[in-house]
């Protein structure tokens, strides 16, 4: 994993413009690929824990993985990671002022 990793344990507040809702998060990462902070939803963090996928691995997928856009703001980032037997790893993303990681999957298959 060669992606630059920037982690912080400070609490950050993010306002989701479409939902007009404020969310609190304790983990911040920064994506050099998207030049934005990365926010993990609780759902994504839970899936990462279930699948033993680290924050560093997610950031590697975001910054060095393949990207497929659904539309201008919704996309998938996916990549085979060395040492894992459940490849490829995929992050489902929404691009706003930050990169929102909605969920993280393993054994991902791109459809269509």
Image: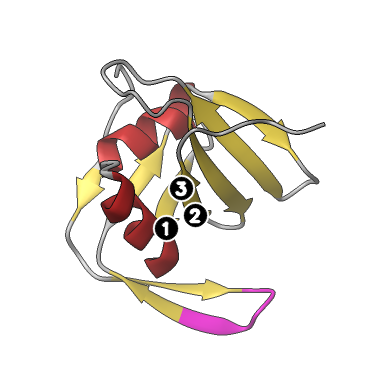
Residue 91, numbered circle:
none
- Mark 1 vs mark 3: which is more N-terminal? 1
- The CA distance from mark 2 to mark 3 is 4 Å
The colour scheme used here is secondary structure
Q: Element at badge 3?
A: strand
Quarter occupied by the C terminus: top right
Which residue is at a point 44% across and 30% down the rendered structure image? 61
| Residue furthest left in the image | 9
Q: Look at the numbered discs 2 and 3 and tell me whether their residues touch, using CB distance below 8 Å.
A: yes
Whether the magenta-drawn stretch holds residue 21 is answered as yes
Q: Is residue 53 left or right of residue 21?
A: left
> Residue 80: x percent and y percent?
44, 20
Name the residue that disc number 3 marks.
Answer: 104
Whether the magenta-drawn stretch holds residue 92 is answered as no
Q: Look at the numbered discs 2 and 1 and tell me whether their residues touch, using CB distance below 8 Å.
A: yes
Residue nearest the viewer, comparing 24 with 109: 109
Residue 44, numbered circle:
1
| Residue furthest bottom in the image | 21
- The CA distance from mark 2 to mark 1 is 4 Å
Name the residue that disc number 2 marks.
Answer: 103
Magenta residues, start to end: 17-22
Tell me if mark 3 has few (under 14), some (14-19) or many (20+) residues whose alpha carbon lies within 10 angstroms of its own. many
Quarter occupied by the N terminus: top left
- Mark 2 vs mark 1: which is more N-terminal? 1
Q: Is residue 23 visible from the viewing direction of this image?
A: yes
């Amino acid at each position: 994993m060669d992606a630059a990793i920037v982690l912080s344990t400070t609490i950050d507040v993010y306002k989701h413009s479409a939902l007009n809702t404020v969310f609190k998060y304790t983990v911040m990462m920064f994506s050099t690929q998207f030049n934005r902070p990365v926010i993990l939803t609780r759902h994504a963090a839970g899936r990462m824990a279930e699948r033993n996928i680290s924050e560093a691995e997610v950031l590697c997928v975001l910054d060095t993985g393949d990207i497929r856009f659904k539309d201008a703001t919704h996309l998938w980032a996916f990549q085979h990671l060395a040492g894992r037997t459940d490849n490829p790893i995929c992050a489902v993303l929404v691009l706003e002022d930050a990169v929102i990681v909605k969920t993280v999957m393993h054994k991902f298959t791109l459809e269509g």
